[in-house]
């Protein structure tokens, strides 16, 4: 007898999708439902605590309110981190993980190293140091609240031993005024100069392939350099070493945006011999690079320096210093990874492949999100209110056409993400230029590309920016 003679007892397509999703070893449970826009189907997945520990921990952290203004970003298949914006997170990953910016010229770490990360930002170097040195003890120094929060979340997510100090590093203890760029936090600092920083960022972008000076480039840079002013505490490296009993520092990393000389002033005669390796960014202003190199040689270090090709139009240089007896790299160069199961981008790719094999005629969910349990509401971004395929207006059609030109026809879907498709700051300039040319300067805020860069979200924003009373249906 047919088990489903009563049509009311037939499982729905969503029930079938759910059962197939649960076949994946990284999925403890799942459900499929309509998204907030009423159009897309969304799969909510409960990661298995053992086989998908990374995603399970991140779902718990988000459900307990630890993210605040932060968002999860996955700059590569092997890394999930909390950060302020996707573009900046991708930049830090390329610089620190794939570019090895702080592990060149013989700089390496022994197991169980003691590391001080001064100017830690969201903790990307802190994570890299933990991978380089199993069992490392890391002091991460970061004065900006949002960034210090990110370090703590990322350390907890990846099980890294990190002490976060919410302070700036300088030549003496006290307080100082600090300029914070929320959309470009890596350039924040005591000596931030909006005009000079504007030129530095533009110079960085202009060194990219296919870059050219344009009004959209200027608008993108202006958006990235919107500033806030804060008062932050200042401590010295001497004080950090004393307070935390650092009898040695295997690696001191300094990236403090033009305050590097002040940071070195805070190292006393007793601390210098206890530092085995030092890597730092130096802004070569008024002969500063030569001065820093001379100071480090006088303290007994072997020194080297280089400049990232993308920084050729800026004053930024990297300096590497190590004691003659300090060991070099402890393992072959490569991109290190944490091993706690898949990231969401990997899991989603595998789930789509699983559904395609098992249900080749069924449409897969448009979006996947992770939650600690199915009774917990996800806090991820809401679905767009307008997107290609749901509201066919001429403005949306224009955006879809531009998107197709940049990424190909297969990328024209609401959940397609600008950065996952390979977009970067230069691609953002091209996107903005074409949107502004066809829809006007106010059609799209540059910041949205970096905070919620799915095609659906951008389409919703472009629809919302339409002149009042206009009805532009294709």
Image (tube, helix red, strand yellow):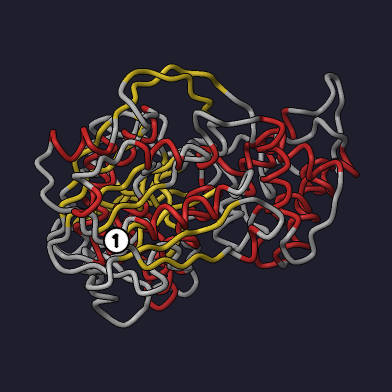
Q: What SS does tag 1 mark?
A: strand
Residue at 46% across, 75% down:
360
Query: Residue 150's quadrant in the figure?
Result: top left
Q: Image height check: is 371 above or below 336? A: above
Q: Image height check: is 311 above or below 463? A: below
Residue extending farthest to the bottom is: 332
From where the camera sits, is residue 38 visible?
no
Where residue 68 appears, as percent x and y from the top left, is 36, 29
Instruction: Compare residues 425 and 232 and report the one nearer the observer.
Output: 232
Left or right: residue 91 compared with residue 143: right
Residue extending farthest to the front is: 298
Quadrant (top left, top right, bottom left, bottom right) of the C terminus: top right
Where residue 154 appears, as percent x and y from the top left, is 28, 46
Residue with the mark numbered 1: 277
Q: Image height check: is 208 above or below 462? A: below
Where residue 247 appears, as percent x and y from the top left, is 10, 49
Left or right: residue 407 compared with residue 235: right
Instruction: Compare residues 94 and 7 and report the one nearer the observer.
Output: 94
Query: Residue 320's quadrant in the figure?
Result: bottom left
Instruction: Compare residues 211 and 444 and report the one nearer the observer.
Output: 211
Residue at 35% across, 60% down:
79
From where the camera sits, is residue 320 visible?
yes
Left or right: residue 364 compared with residue 135: right
């Amino acid at each position: 007898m047919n088990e489903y003679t009563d049509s009311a007892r037939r499982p729905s397509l969503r029930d079938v999708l759910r059962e197939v999703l649960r076949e994946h070893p990284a999925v403890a449970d799942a459900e499929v439902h309509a998204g907030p826009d009423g159009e897309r189907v969304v799969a909510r997945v409960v990661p298995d605590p053992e086989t998908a520990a990374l995603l399970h921990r991140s779902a718990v952290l988000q459900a307990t309110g630890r993210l605040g203004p932060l968002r999860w970003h996955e700059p590569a298949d092997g890394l999930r981190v909390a950060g302020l914006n996707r573009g900046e997170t991708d930049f830090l990953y390329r610089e620190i993980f794939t570019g090895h910016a702080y592990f060149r010229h013989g700089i390496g770490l022994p197991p169980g190293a003691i590391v001080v990360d001064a100017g830690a930002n969201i903790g990307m170097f802190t994570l890299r140091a933990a991978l380089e040195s199993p069992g490392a003890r890391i002091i991460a120094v970061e004065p900006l609240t949002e960034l210090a929060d990110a370090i703590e979340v990322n350390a907890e997510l990846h099980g890294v031993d990190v002490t976060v100090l919410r302070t700036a590093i300088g030549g003496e203890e006290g307080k100082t005024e600090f300029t914070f760029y929320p959309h470009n936090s890596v350039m924040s600092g005591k000596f931030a100069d909006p005009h000079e920083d504007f030129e530095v960022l533009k110079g960085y972008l202009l060194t990219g392939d296919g870059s050219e000076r344009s009004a959209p480039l200027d608008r993108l840079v202006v958006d990235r350099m919107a500033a806030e002013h804060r008062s932050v505490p200042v401590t010295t490296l001497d004080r950090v070493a004393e307070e935390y009993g650092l009898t040695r520092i295997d690696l001191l990393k300094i990236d403090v945006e033009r305050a590097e000389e002040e940071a070195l002033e805070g190292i006393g005669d007793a601390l210098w011999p206890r530092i085995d390796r030092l890597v730092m960014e130096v802004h070569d202003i008024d002969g500063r690079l030569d001065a820093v190199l001379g100071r480090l040689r006088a303290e007994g270090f072997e020194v080297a320096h280089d400049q990232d090709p993308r920084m050729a139009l800026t004053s930024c240089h990297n300096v590497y210093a190590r004691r003659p007896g300090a060991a070099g790299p402890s393992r072959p160069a490569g991109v290190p990874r944490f091993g706690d199961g898949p990231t969401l981008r990997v899991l989603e790719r595998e789930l789509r492949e699983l559904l395609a094999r098992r249900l080749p005629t069924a449409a897969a969910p448009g979006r996947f999100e992770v939650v600690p349990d199915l009774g917990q509401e996800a806090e991820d971004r809401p679905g767009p209110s307008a997107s290609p395929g749901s509201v066919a207006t001429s403005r949306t059609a224009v955006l879809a056409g531009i998107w197709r030109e940049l990424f190909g026809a297969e990328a024209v879907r609401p959940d397609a993400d600008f950065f996952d498709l390979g977009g970067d700051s230069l691609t953002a300039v091209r996107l903005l230029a074409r949107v502004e040319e066809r829809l006007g300067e106010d059609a799209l805020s540059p910041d949205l590309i970096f905070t919620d860069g799915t095609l659906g979200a951008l389409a919703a924003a472009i629809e919302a920016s339409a002149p009042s009373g206009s009805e532009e249906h294709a």
